[in-house]
Structure formats: C-alpha cells, structure tokens
Image: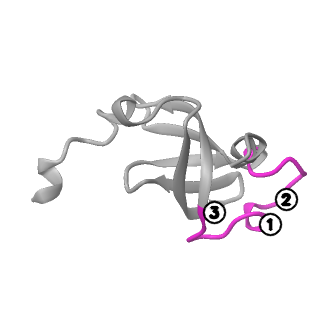
Amino acid sequence: SLKRLQPEPWETIHEKFQVGDIVEATVTKLTEFGAFARVKDSVEGLIHISELSSQMVQHPREVVKEGDDVRLKILRIEPERRRLGLSLVQAEDEGY
C-alpha cells in the first residue's frame, strides 16, 4: 500500500515539529477533557480543556467544534507514547 511506503509519522515528528511551534490543525473529536486535532495531515494531538481558553470551560464545544481549523502551539512531543500536547490559548496569547 502507499501508506506503508511513507515513514511512520511518529518516527519523523521531530524533523517536522518542535516544542513551541505554532501549527495549523483541524479539530477531529471532542471529549469531556479536551479536543483532539490533526496537525497538517500528520499526527493527532490533544488540546487539554485547560488549554482551550483563558476562561473556565465546562465542555470543549463551548470553544471549538469538530471540523474547525485552528492555530495551535505545540507544548509537548512524546513520540514513544504517540502523544502530542497542544494549546489554543497559548497560540492566541502569542498573537496567532
């Protein structure tokens, strides 16, 4: 398959992204504790509910919805655990 010819995204994540980068992403799923977003057709990361807004949020749907395109700041990259920590509020604080 064509997908198998491509390198595993988590193996090359540090070549594409660094902690502190501002990236374009699309919200893919909402949960009680945050929202998941796919970064540039690559990997999916979590925007924890505390990183969605500087205001208190009861549920992520108060700030974003599935399909929204957003600019996010990368907080953590953990390829061994396949985790990416993202922030909407910190990207906005930097003027994005």
Left or right of residue 2: residue 16: right
Which residue position is annotated with label 3? Answer: 30
For label 1, the SS is: helix
User: Marks 3 and 2, how far apart in space?
Assistant: 12 Å
Task: Residue at 47%, 29% (x, y): give it.
Answer: 78
For label 2, the SS is: loop
First in sequence: mark 3 or mark 2?
3
Hey, what amino acid is under mark 1? Glu
Q: Which residues are magenta?
A: 51-69
**Residue 80, picture quadrant:** top left
Q: Name above or below for residue 85 compared with residue 60.
A: above
User: Marks 3 and 1, how far apart in space?
Assistant: 11 Å
Q: Name above or below for residue 31 compared with residue 87.
A: below
For label 3, the SS is: strand
Left or right of residue 40: residue 15: left
Which residue position is annotated with label 1? Answer: 62
Is there a contact, CB below 8 Å, between mark 3 and mark 2?
Answer: no
**Residue 74, picture quadrant:** top right
